[in-house]
Image (cartoon, rainbow, N blue to C red):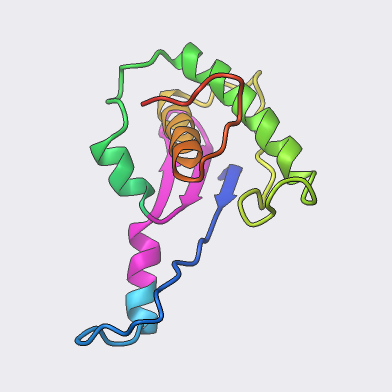
């Protein structure tokens, strides 16, 4: 299966210096569970492409805050995704100007390929989530839900 868009963003959650009683150390098993719960793998029967998003909180945001499937047309999301991907890749190539911890990997998104609704939906919503969460703007318009 082709991996078209590897977005692997592992962000460390910083904890405060104050200790909290009753919470044990993060074990390998618990850490695996956290990563599994924050990993979104989107593949579709209609095509051979997949997108992998590892981002703490994205699953919960997608389920609770994002617009439902069908709200945006596929062509709308494809147009926005093209703009976002272009700017994202520019930032990956400029680590001195943009935080390399935020823009780690290049995204391979070809406007001439029909990735299907589901992949465009998740990618579009990831870009909205990313911009709102990290106070970034990937295009001239304000990201909205």
Q: Is residue 98 above or below residue 10?
A: above
Residue at the spot x=40%, y=49% of the render? 40
Residue 119, percent across and down?
46, 32
Residue at the spot x=71%, y=37% of the render? 89
Instruction: Report whether 54 appears left or right of 70.
Output: right
The quadrant holding residue 46 is top left
Q: Where are the magenta residues, as a range?
A: 32-56
37 within the magenta span:
yes
Instruction: Report whether 28 appears left or right of 2.
Output: left
123 within the magenta span:
no
Residue 23, percent across and down?
24, 83
Count of number-bearing discs: 0
Q: Is residue 31 above or below residue 69?
A: below
Q: Is residue 15 above or below residue 107?
A: below
Considering the image in quadrants, where does the N terminus appear?
A: top right
Residue 79, percent across and down?
57, 16
Closer to the camera in the image, 14 or 51: 14
Residue at the spot x=34%, y=82% of the render? 18
Residue 21, percent across and down?
22, 87
Residue at the spot x=80%, y=51% of the render? 96
Considering the image in quadrants, where does the C terminus appear?
A: top left
Q: Is residue 107 above or below residue 70?
A: below
Q: Residue furthest front?
A: 18
């Amino acid at each position: 299966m082709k991996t078209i868009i590897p977005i692997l963003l592992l962000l460390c959650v910083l904890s405060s210096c104050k200790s909290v009683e009753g919470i044990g150390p993060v074990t390998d098993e618990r850490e695996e569970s956290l990563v599994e719960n924050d990993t979104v793998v989107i593949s579709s029967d209609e095509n051979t492409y997949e997108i992998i998003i590892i981002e703490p909180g994205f699953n919960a945001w997608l389920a609770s805050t994002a617009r439902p499937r069908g709200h945006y047309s596929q062509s709308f999301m494809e147009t926005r995704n093209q703009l976002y991907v272009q700017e994202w890749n520019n930032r990956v190539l400029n680590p001195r100007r943009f935080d390399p911890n935020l823009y780690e990997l290049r995204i391979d998104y070809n406007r001439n390929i029909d990735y299907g609704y589901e992949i465009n939906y998740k990618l579009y919503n990831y870009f909205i989530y990313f911009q709102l969460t990290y106070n970034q703007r990937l295009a001239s318009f304000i990201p909205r839900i």
